[in-house]
Amino acid sequence: MISIPMFHWLYTLCAVGILACASLHSALAIDEDRPNILWITSEDNGISWVSCYGGTNAQTPAIDQLAREGFRYLYCFDNAAVCAPTRSCWITGMYAISNGTQPMRSRNEIPHDRIKYYPDLLRARGYHTSNPTKTDYNIGGRPDKDCWDFKGGKGKSPYGWRYRTEGQPFFAVVNIGDSHESRAHGKVDQTTNDPEKMTLFSYHPDLPVIRQNYAKYADAVEKMDGKVGDTIAALKADGLYDDTIIVYNSDHGGVMARSKRFLYASGVHCPLIVRIPEKYKSLYPAEKPGMTVDRMVSFIDMPKTWLSLAGAEIPQTFQGTIFLGDGQESAPKYHFAFRERADGRVDHVRMVRDKRFAYHKNYYPFAPAGQHLAYLWKAPATPAWEKHHREGKTDAVTGRFFEPRVSEEFYDNEADFDNVHNQDEGWKPM
């Protein structure tokens, strides 16, 4: 016979067990409901090269379709305007200038025992992480691919989710290099796109070789768009489309001279599209898919947002603002960007902007923006532009790239996306 005290003890034990089981079941249910995240990045193309953002030089049907099924952000900006410092911001969730990793190709070391990479934190949360094609973090002291579960390799699929444990949630980066600056190098006389139909930035003189170079890059962007479509098709073929949040953005602007590496709108204003499956509709940033979102997003916000969506730990070192999901924070008022040494050319520029206005501070105004940079000059448009200027054929707009700058610039990006009309006369920052 069980005594009264013994009965109460067994009853309590059973009750605790039932509650524990219920809690465990609830936790498992929450875990099983964590979204997969596919982050598709393309290299070097700003919004002007994407047709759903109004670009006319290239047609991007796959990206456009993603925008129709998802949400197109109107104000997304890169912090560094060039690849390696940008990726340093992304991987650490910290501004590269906070870590001293902003000079291009520096690989300065950081305290890795105190600064975690966002994939480390996703892995701790149980996610399978993959980034088989592009790391380039500009950080020393740790191999770039050390933080990823699947690192790629010869003969391996670029779709890293295929290497996870069955049923494991995944965070997969698919980086597409077909729109990289290098695709604008070399001969430009045989293009699919018609050079005569290209719309030039107002700071470029209308020369045949420049039109041809635009057309060559438009061909590259369209090839990139095809790879975006291939990636989404692979996700569908694997039966994961309805369980995966898809994010598409470029890694900075570009690619014709005076965009990539520079803090003007063509160098930092980037496409950002997020598709959220219906099962996660509580995460929608607007009423329904196909709508635009006018919240300002800085690249520094992205890693913190990915961790929040996954329910992972977010260290205090992360400097961004969560822009999507249940943990969404108030939108920042301003975006901050920086330019430092790019390969062998030294510069020092800071820029702060909101959705419309941008203030640039040039700390080396004696140096022209268009300092000779060997890699930039490989695109035929750049030496042709410089030659045109040296022959005295440029005007105040098309020639300014090769002249010393002023200390301060102020632009209305709504009226002057090309940033050629400096409104700084008599203006002083508050």
Image (cartoon, rainbow, N blue to C red):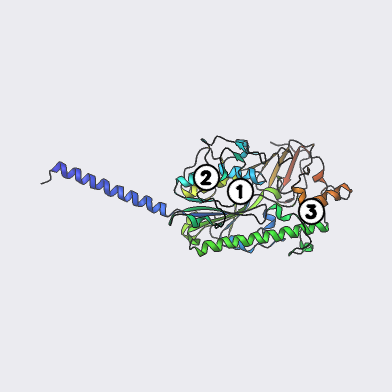
Residue situated in front as seen by the camera: 134 or 92: 134
Q: Is residue 243 above or below residue 382?
A: below
Residue situated in front as seen by the camera: 192 or 364: 192
Percent from the top left, x then y, of residue 267? 70, 48
What residue sits 50% from the left and 56% below the top? 161
Badge 2 or badge 1: first in the primary sequence: 2
Q: Residues within 10 Å of mark 1 (few under 14, many from 20)?
A: some
Q: Residues within 10 Å of mark 3 (few under 14, many from 20)?
A: some
**What kind of element bears circle 2?**
helix
Cα distance, mark 3 to mark 1?
A: 35 Å
Q: Is residue 16 left or right of residue 137?
A: left
Q: Is residue 55 visible?
A: no
Q: Is residue 318 visible?
A: yes
- Checking the image for residue 296, the label placed there is 1
Percent from the top left, x then y, of residue 23? 33, 49
Badge 3 or badge 1: first in the primary sequence: 1
Cα distance, mark 2 to mark 1?
A: 29 Å
State the image quarter where residue 191 is shown.
bottom right
Could you tell me the amino acid type at mark 3? Pro
Which residue, given by chain and number where applicable, does mark 2 sit on? 147
Which residue, given by chain and number where applicable, does mark 3 sit on? 380
Tag nearer the camera, 2 or 1: 2
